[in-house]
Amino acid sequence: MGWKISLIAILLPGVVGMSQLMSYSNTPGETRTTVPQVIPTELIPTTLSDEKRAQSKVLVFYHPHCPCTRATIRSLQRLESMFAPDTQIVGYAYQPASKDDNWIETTTTQALRSLQNATVLADRDAQACEDFEIVTSGHVLVYDHDGELKFSGGITPSRGHEGSCASGTAFLNSVNGKTNAEQSWPVFGCPIVRNGEGP
């Protein structure tokens, strides 16, 4: 009997820890319902040419040092070969006021920048996040040629995990001009502005 109690005492912390980790992985971050339904002209990056400004856009808001967001970028890498050819990708890399431009140059930023038709912008003091009402890293928006919102949410099945999921399918549909029954999806990521970092 004694060895059974000892075995339980050894295994129980691991079981509890695994349960907590699973719960955390499957808990979405905060999202808001006030994301602009039509992209304001003044919020379209001025770095894009007039032609590109008129094309459909995938906007990716992220914290460059968030480990969860790596799965979002890997999902984009996996799906990009199926994107409509004129799709523009704009990444908004959060940059605290106290950090210089090199702070956003992480492997996540490099991977995002390597995508076809991708532009990465430093989102100083989370101004773009504020404009678009984004609070969680890995939140993706898709606006069509007419500037109308077609997708809002995450494209991973849980925090830090990639793979096929309903939101990923809906995201790809929206990029390619197809209609989805659902427009908003949960985002599995960390807060973009963390305690002690933000404005």
Image (cartoon, rainbow, N blue to C red):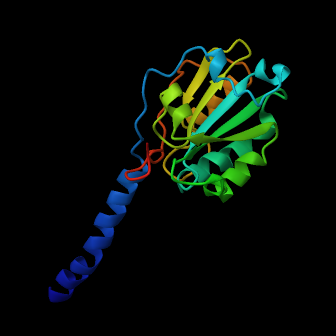
Q: Taking 74 as reference, is 54 above or below it?
A: above
Point out the image quarter for the C terminus: top left
Q: Is residue 145 left or right of residue 8?
A: right
Residue at 35% across / 52% down in the picture? Answer: 23
Q: Is residue 62 left or right of residue 19?
A: right
Residue at 53% across / 34% down in the picture? Answer: 127
Q: Is residue 28 left or right of residue 165?
A: left
Residue at 72% across / 53% down in the picture? Answer: 110
Q: Taking 109 as reference, is 17 above or below it?
A: below
Q: Is residue 160 visible?
A: yes
Question: Can you give x and y, in whole percent of width and height, for residue 94 in the image?
Answer: 56, 44
Question: Can you give x and y, in whole percent of width and height, for residue 71 in the image?
Answer: 60, 51
Seen as rendered, the residue at the extreme top is 146
Residue at 62% across / 18% down in the picture? Answer: 39
Q: Quadrant of residue 166?
A: top right
Seen as rendered, the residue at the extreme left is 1
Q: Nearer the viewer, residue 147 or 16?
A: 147
Point out the image quarter for the N terminus: bottom left
Question: Can you give x and y, in whole percent of width and height, for residue 122 in the image?
Answer: 63, 43
Q: Nearer the viewer, residue 158 or 9?
A: 158
Q: Quadrant of residue 92?
A: top right
Question: Can you give x and y, in whole percent of width and height, for residue 177 in the image?
Answer: 72, 19
Q: How many marks?
A: 0
Q: Is residue 179 visible?
A: no
Seen as rendered, the residue at the extreme bottom is 2
Q: Nearer the viewer, residue 157 or 197?
A: 197
